Amino acid sequence: MYSPTQPTMPQKSFVTPTRLMTGKDLPSGLRLNTLAGWNQTAADWRGFLENSPAGCFVAELDGQIVGTAATIIYENRFAWIGMVLVDPEFRNRGIGTQLLHKAIEHLDHLGIATMKLDATPLGKPIYLKLGFVPEYEIERWTLKRPAPVEPAQPVWCPNLEHAQIARICEFDRELFGADRSYLLQSLDRRAPELTNIAWKDDRPHAYSFGRKGLFADHLGPCAAMDPKIAEQLLRSFLERSARETLIVDCLLSHSAFLDSLRAAGFVSSRPLTRMFRGPNSHPGRPESICTILGPEFG
């Protein structure tokens, strides 16, 4: 990070060599998101490479990875762009924009008509120039709480049966707009104690997943039409997580859930804007989604 006494790099754009990301680049990706204060882990980076080996890119200078961008294609309905990161010492050189163009060109070449992303206020003007338009607003909420006096007791959670996870993924496909079952299954494998499903007539009608990030546990996705059930899912997450820092990315349209976050001690930390480029033919049902999986995944 820069300090006020450090000289800044010239603010000019130039072409930086880019290439496909490989497994050997995982530590460099983790280094960049750690520098940025992002919550991704090495397992998250592996998820990008496993699901989109031809759609993850790095910018490299003198053997050092100075930028990244990743894409995930959801059922050929739309693609997600995330993890656009630049080393703080190499910012203001157009590296992030160059990587973003690389990701868009890759998806255009594959014929993916619709691209989506979650933009910070700083990135939003850049995305607008590239043809992205706002879909809806999201806000990140953070809770910092004291560490438990005693180590948290593990929560026993029965493994979901194959038929159960299939029904949950089918329900999520309807709400999200495309199939992302491999991601939900991965979340449940990595943190089964943070998976919570509300069943009705042997069918899921509300659910929440969670993941253990670099410095915080992250609730999402969480979907529930009934505000009372949504609050119950939040309380369950608070009880099952043993971390001091918790993160939730909530749709601003869900005022009742925002009230629940405030009541639990969460504080708003940053806004995000969900944006799309191309036809938004599969918007899903955002009115039923309380929290997203995360800005990098959708």
Image (spheres, grey):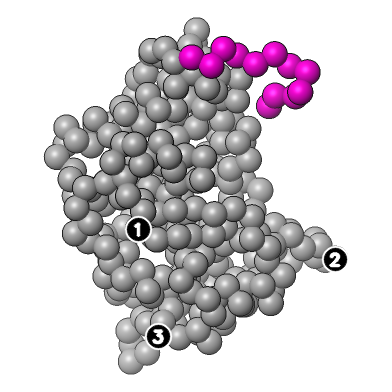
Instruction: Say left or right for 201 vs 235.
Output: left
Overall secondary structure of the magenta section: loop
- The tag earlier along the polypeptide, 2 or 1, is 1
| Quarter of the image that includes the N terminus | top right
Task: Name the foreground residue: 28 vs 174.
Answer: 174
Q: Which residues are magenta?
A: 1-12
Query: Label 2 amino acid?
Result: Val
Q: Position of residue 167 (x, y in %)?
A: 29, 74
| Quarter of the image that includes the C terminus | bottom left
Give the farthest residue toward the bottom.
201
Q: Please identify the quarter of the rendering in which residue 150 is found.
A: bottom right
* Residue marked by disc 1: 135
Q: Position of residue 273 (x, y in %)?
A: 44, 53
Task: Name the foreground residue: 128 vs 173.
Answer: 128
Q: Check residue 143 for magenta coloring.
A: no
* Residue marked by disc 2: 149
The secondary structure type at the circle numbered 2 is: loop
Instruction: Say left or right for 13 vs 246.
Output: left
- The tag earlier along the polypeptide, 3 or 1, is 1
- The tag earlier along the polypeptide, 3 or 2, is 2
Q: Kindly identify the residue that appears in the image at 31 percent across and 27 percent down.
A: 102
Task: Name the foreground residue: 29 vs 143.
Answer: 143
Q: Is residue 168 visible?
A: yes
Query: Label 3 amino acid?
Result: Trp
The secondary structure type at the circle numbered 3 is: strand
Q: Please identify the quarter of the rendering in which residue 258 is found.
A: bottom right
